[in-house]
Amino acid sequence: MLLRRIKEIIIIIMNSDAMTNHAIAAEIGRRIERMRLEQNLTQQQVADEVGISRVSYRKLVGGAAKFENLIAVLRVLGHLDLVEQFVPESVFSPIEQLKLKGKQRQRATGEHAQKTEADSEKSEEGLDW
């Protein structure tokens, strides 16, 4: 059973770039549904614990969930730690932290995107065909 799960995860990871956003959301819902069944809980029990209707729970496992409800279901199922794996904490490099002088970054400058566009324009100008 464990080997089958590992194979499924590898296949999903390899195909995730080719999957649509809805397909990825539906896959997350399928995994949540599997966790619920492993704990032998009914849809109604999970929905009641979260404070949503059973219909809302069905939408959630179908891939159409509010992010807050998704987090609540993971909490009920005892898998809130998956959120940390889903979006890990981002840490600036030590050099960037020194530049900020202890302040937290609030917005992006967009310099990287502007440089990339300018570089591509320069490289196109150098073409003689």
Image (cartoon, grey):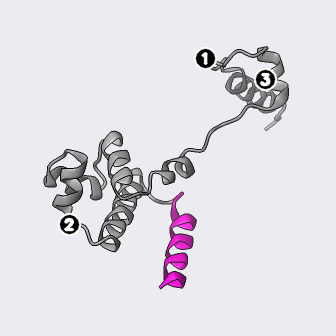
Task: Write the residue at 83% across / 35% down.
Answer: 128
Residue situated in front as seen by the camera: 72 or 93: 72
Task: Write the residue at 55% across / 47% down.
Answer: 84
Categorize mark 1 by other alpha carbons within 10 Å: few (<14), some (14-19), many (20+): few
Image coords of residue 78 (percent x, y): 41, 57
Residue situated in front as seen by the camera: 40 or 20: 40
Query: Mark 3 or 2, which is nearer the eye?
Result: 2
Find numbered disc 3 in the image and state the secondary structure of the residue it sits on: helix
Image coords of residue 113 (percent x, y): 68, 26
Query: Disc 3 to disc 2, how far (Cα)?
Result: 48 Å
Find numbered disc 1 in the image and state the secondary structure of the residue it sits on: loop
Q: Circle 2 sits on which residue?
A: 42
Q: Circle 1 sits on which residue?
A: 106
| Range of magenta residues | 1-17
Task: Write the residue at 35% across / 70% down.
Answer: 34
Q: Quadrant of the C terminus?
A: top right
Image coords of residue 120 (percent x, y): 75, 31
Mark 3 or 2, nearer chain start: 2
Query: Disc 1 to disc 2, how far (Cα)?
Result: 43 Å
Asked if the stretch drawn in magenta spans residue 78, the answer is no
Mark 1 or 2, nearer chain start: 2
User: Quadrant location of residue 31?
Assistant: bottom left
Find numbered disc 2 in the image and state the secondary structure of the residue it sits on: loop
Total residue callouts: 3
Mark 3 or 1, nearer chain start: 3
Circle 1/circle 2 CB separation < 8 Å:
no
Q: Is residue 123 left or right of residue 17?
A: right
Task: Say what amino acid the circle numbered 1 marks.
Answer: Gln
Task: Say what amino acid the circle numbered 3 marks.
Answer: Gln
Categorize mark 3 by other alpha carbons within 10 Å: few (<14), some (14-19), many (20+): some
Q: Circle 3 sits on which residue?
A: 97
Task: Say what amino acid the circle numbered 2 marks.
Answer: Thr
